[in-house]
Image (cartoon, rainbow, N blue to C red):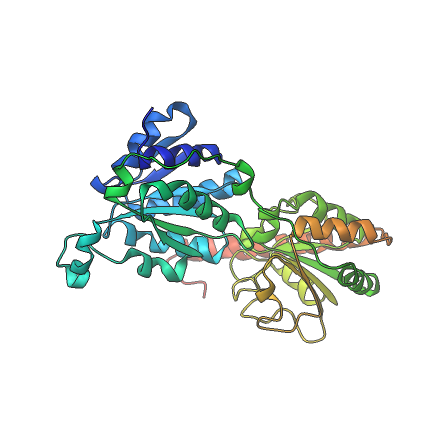
Amino acid sequence: MKKHGGNVMAGLLADYGVTAVFGVPGGQTLPLYYGILDEGNRIRHILMKDEIDATFAADAYARISGGIGVCDATAGCGAIKFISGLAEAYNTSIPVIAIGSEMEGDWLAARYRGTGSQVVDSKEVLKPVTKWQACLPHVNKMPELVQTAAQMAVSGRPGPVFIECPWRPFREEYTGPDYESNRKLASLPAHRPTPSRDEIDEAIQVLKEAKRPVMLLGGGAWRSGARAEITALAERMAMPAAASLTGKGVLPENHPLSLGVVGSLGGNDVSRKMVEEADVILAIGFKFSQNSTYGWTIPRKGQKEIRIDIDETEMNKLHTTDVGLVGDAKATLQLLLDRLDAQRDPTAVEKEIAKLYRAWRKKTGRRWRLTIVLLRRGSSPY
């Protein structure tokens, strides 16, 4: 059976475990649509009302499935609308492959101020919000392009990538060599690096000496699949955990050591008090944004910080990291658990958290009832 560029792309995406592509069609990207149809039940296309919606849908798909999200748009005016959704995926490290198109090579000189319809340098527009960008030079390079895009999306610190497929090579017949697809190449996380034993031991020593340790959980903890390890460490060290919005639920919120969300968006008095009074903070895939740290006031002076992150550039960013553990959260936490011989009774901490929450709910219940009464009267509670 003859294959065109769209067949090759759709088949490889399906091999990588992608079951849905979100997008808005255009004449230049129709080969992908025909390729998806030819794949039958392995992969489907979901039509979106807008290209912006397509990127956010791909982002959500990646978060829920634990795999790669894929979106598509036509050349120029379509692809450049990816920017909002890709910015979110880039900042929160979500693996997304955004597929756009381009006019014929001999049209590229017409990019200047719209001389050629839909001729926009999409790669340059999307460069600030993607890890990697590339253009398909020839249909026979399609397997290499898709494979590299998938690997780039999931490797290291995950994130979105953009691939541009001009109309001509997209629709041409594939005549290149046979190719194989390896689903592991597109698995998340792609690799699970770990810190050295000495670094692990240094972190363990700090945890053993801690009187009131607290964990801060971010989106990186979710994407690593570290839920079981985080729960085990919290229980072994009697260590409560607060989360950013993207880390919400890594430690189940009905767990007696869960503090819920911390920060100005969604946080509460209990999580703030426990985090601010901690002597040691163990941050796991946590970015320390202004929202989750009350305007960068956490960590506070005198607090020690152990930081686990796949991205070494996160270490010592904004503030000094006392112990930096560069590695995958799940694998690094398992090393900590394997070498940590300490055990603490969580009963006292759990009772403290429960007492604080009862007081907080009582206080906030009164406050919100008063707010509702004042609003009904047309008065401002502020």
Residue placed furthest toward the left = 115
Viewer-closest of 133 and 47: 133
Q: Is residue 346 visible?
A: no
Q: Is residue 110 above or below residue 11?
A: below
Q: Is residue 267 visible?
A: yes
Quarter of the view holding residue 306: bottom right
Relative side of 176 to 348, left or right: left
Viewer-closest of 108 and 131: 108
Point out residue 241 in the picture as x, y percentages from the top left corner. 68, 54
Q: Is residue 8 above or below residue 253?
A: above
Residue under the point 62% across and 71% down: 316
Residue placed furthest toward the bottom = 301
Residue under the point 26% across and 58% down: 121
* Location of the C terminus (image quadrant): bottom left
Viewer-closest of 222 and 3: 3
Residue under the point 50% across and 54% down: 93
Point out residue 9 in the picture as x, y percentages from the top left corner. 37, 37
* Location of the N terminus (image quadrant): top left
